[in-house]
């Protein structure tokens, strides 16, 4: 095609290049659902499942052994386990390290967010607190540190925005694809599509053991009264579409299939 300036096209009344050759992928897409975002990005959007809004812990097992005060849930005896189960999802939560500051290393403000009740992203007061790096806040416990330490001091709230891809197993229990996590701590990207090596125990290497395609979210009790608020989750499904024909180029009425 002869070079034509954008200015020239605009002058001719052509607002785009649609009269040239256009690539079409041959996929018939379903229209994406409409979701109304919250007033602030931290607020649950219209399709979120709210697990804790400050009122009570009725969406969780073992809530009786935790406490809720002034809209904040404090870790108590035993882990908190969501009633509902999730696979791929977006998870938002906010947490605050205990005050006054007590202890050091893993003993300071330790809790944790477990995806599917077995893969931990660490919650710890890592503000001016040395510990092993793959055990500090935002670490996938014993697998990787966060890329950076984006902690706020104990008097302030931290946010985690977590994007979780569940592992897949075949019918025989063999791993087909691993779990991946992307996480944003206080607006800062700390894990980018990190591939998990398996679960996250303290006392043995990580490994995958087949489990159902969904599992609960749990919050760890590590003996420290970490505060939590504003917990919501969105099960995630990619856009759906069907390949209804081969990809092709279109130029006016002329269609040219794209050969492999
Ligand atoms: Mg922990």
Image (cartoon, rainbow, N blue to C red):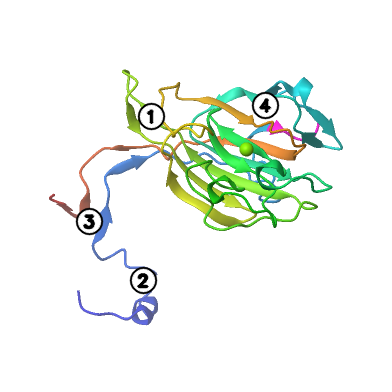
- The answer to which of marks 2 and 3 sits earlier in the sequence is 2
Residue to which mark 4 is pinned: 79
- The nearer-to-camera label among 2 and 1 is 1
Residue at 53% x, 25% y is 215
> Closer to the camera: disc 4 or disc 1?
4
Name the mark nearer the viewer: 3 or 4. Answer: 4
Measured in 3D between alpha carbons, the distance from the residue under mark 3 to the one under mark 1, in whole angstroms, is 39 Å
Quadrant that contains the N terminus:
bottom left
Q: Is residue 113 above or below residue 190?
A: above
Label 3 with label 1: CB-CB less than 8 Å: no
Query: Label for residue 14?
Result: 2
What residue does disc 3 label? Answer: 250
* Residue 149: percent from left, percent from top: 60, 57
Q: Earlier in the sequence, mark 3 or mark 1?
A: 1
Q: Along the line of sight, which residue is nearer the eye, 206 or 242? A: 206
Tell me the residue that label 1 is attached to. 168
Q: Earlier in the sequence, mark 2 or mark 4?
A: 2
Earlier along the polypeptide chain: callout 2 or callout 1? 2
């Amino acid at each position: 095609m002869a070079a034509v300036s954008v200015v020239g096209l605009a002058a001719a009344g052509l607002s785009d290049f649609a009269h040239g050759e256009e690539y079409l992928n041959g996929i018939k897409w379903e229209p994406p659902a409409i979701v109304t975002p919250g007033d602030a990005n931290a607020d649950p959007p219209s399709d979120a499942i709210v697990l804790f809004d400050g009122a009570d812990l009725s969406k969780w097992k073992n809530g009786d052994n935790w406490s809720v005060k002034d809209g904040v849930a404090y870790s108590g005896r035993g882990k908190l386990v969501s009633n509902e189960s999730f696979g791929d999802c977006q998870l938002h939560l906010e947490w605050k390290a205990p005050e006054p500051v007590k202890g050091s290393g893993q003993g300071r403000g330790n809790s944790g967010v477990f995806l599917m009740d077995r893969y931990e992203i660490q919650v710890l007061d890592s503000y001016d607190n040395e510990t092993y790096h793959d055990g500090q806040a935002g670490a996938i416990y014993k697998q990787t540190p966060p890329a950076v330490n984006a902690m706020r001091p104990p008097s302030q709230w931290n946010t985690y925005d977590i994007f979780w891809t569940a592992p897949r197993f075949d019918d025989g229990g063999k791993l087909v694809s691993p779990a991946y996590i992307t996480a944003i701590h206080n607006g800062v990207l700390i894990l980018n599509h990190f591939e998990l090596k398996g679960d996250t125990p303290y006392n043995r290497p990580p490994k995958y053991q087949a489990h159902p395609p969904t599992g609960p979210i749990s919050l760890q009790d590590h003996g420290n009264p970490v505060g939590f608020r504003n917990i919501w989750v969105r099960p995630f499904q990619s856009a759906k579409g069907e390949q209804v024909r081969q990809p092709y180029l279109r130029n006016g009425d002329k269609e040219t299939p794209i050969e492999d």
